[in-house]
Amino acid sequence: MKLPIDRFKELRTPFYCYDLSLLRSTLQVIKDEIEGYPFVVHYALKANANPVLLNEIVKTGIGADLVSGNEIMAALEAGFSPSRMAYAGVGKTDWEIETGIDNDIYCFNVESVPEMEVINEIAARKGKTAGIAIRVNPNIDAHTHRYITTGTTDNKFGIDVPVLDEVVEKAVSLSNIHLRGLHFHIGSQITTLEPFRLLCEKINELVEHFEKMGVKFEMIDVGGGLGVDYENPEQNPIAPFHDFFNVFKQSLKLREGQQVHFEFGRSIVAQCGALISRVVFVKENSIKKFVILDAGMTDLIRPALYSAHHKIVNLTSQKQEQEIYDVVGPICESSDVFSTDEKLPITRRGDLIALLTAGAYGESMASRYNMRDLPQCHFC
Ligand code: LLP
């Protein structure tokens, strides 16, 4: 992504910098890949709901994948069409369900029978029919961080395959819901295509099984999860959409008129954002040198929460000579560490530092812990 260092010099740090032209190119790649296929793409707002980014994304006509009532409101405000909104989550409250029904969203991705009953009840009260998909837990290991694996039986998401017959029958029997299809999401930051291939096999089996029971699905939602390159973002600024879509083009046995829905978060916005901060101090003890930034885990929590590594670049120092540092934030928590044993050019107080690939789950997960200000944002 573009990093206009001269512009950064006057700006107060820390801030997120977003490259809108890279975002546009990423969206164009997706558009080109799905052209001619019955594929519908949604953007998962949880990755980043910055209104300027939403404004770019909504222009392409893609839908929205939502996980709270407030996200539904933000998507409406940004101009996403309710007919392209899917709403997932294991704990939808009554007002959130009402918000979805009042706005006639396309689909509730339902995660349990009690939830399905409540949606039916609320829809009946309003004299409406709510579109739903049943979120299936396919028990496929996405081989990603355990906090972002969602499709195995030991986590809270979806409905297990062995009880699916009963749940589908129940959905068909309720008069104020309309069963549109099945929903899957097996995890996030998935960097091999094998889990997606296994997912296609599982979907084919299930579609065939339910067809025999006389149940047809108008759509299959395969979720998100496509990983991005955190280690070489400059070489790979756009996620491997071509190979990813090919898996679904080749492996899914679609029925006449059936659509496939995708819910991308990270792969759309991650590479378009960087967190820019300044070095407050460089400090040394008997075994280590620390670069202490004015950005911390309140601005970008991924390293502290998932041991994620974001590529770190010193934008100021051109020095050839390098040193090994622990790059840390100012928060009063030992986990407020961006990287240990990071090789950087000799770094000084005041240097500008970029943490790359921070456009997804960066700003959206920021907090005010330690009464810190939320990070600012700028666009290039
Ligand atoms: N659909 C559903 C139902 C989801 O739960 C998620 C993400 C997505 C789509 C979008 O997945 P993506 O394309 O972004 O992988 N905070 C974590 C990631 C949590 C993902 C939660 N669900 C991180 O920073 O790595």
Image (spheres, rainbow, N blue to C red):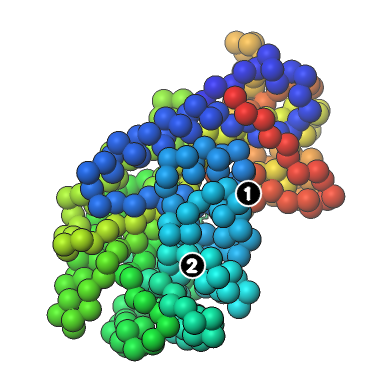
| Relative vertical location of residue 123 with respect to residue 255 in this rendering, above or below | below
Residue at the spot 82% in from the left edge and 45% down from the top edge: 372
- Crowd band around label 2 with a 10 angstrom C-alpha radius: few (<14), some (14–19), many (20+): some
Judge whether residue 268 can be spotted in this image: yes
Task: Tell me the quarter of the picture where residue 375 sits.
Answer: top right
Task: Tell me the quarter of the picture where residue 69 sits.
Answer: bottom right
Give the x, y percent position of residue 188. 45, 53
Of circles 2 and 1, the one toward us is: 2
The answer to whether the beta carbon of the residue marked 1 is less than 8 Å from any atom of ligand 1 is no
Residue 355 vs residue 136: left or right? right
Residue 371 vs residue 295: left or right? right
Alpha-carbon distance for marks 2 and 1? 26 Å
**Residue lying furthest right:** 371
| Relative vertical location of residue 253 with respect to residue 245 in this rendering, above or below | below
Name the residue tied to disc 2. 104
Residue 58 vs residue 204: left or right? right
Residue at the spot 41% in from the left edge and 37% down from the top edge: 27
Give the x, y percent position of residue 1. 52, 25
- Crowd band around label 1 with a 10 angstrom C-alpha radius: few (<14), some (14–19), many (20+): some
Name the residue tied to disc 1. 364
Foreground residue, 175 or 31? 175
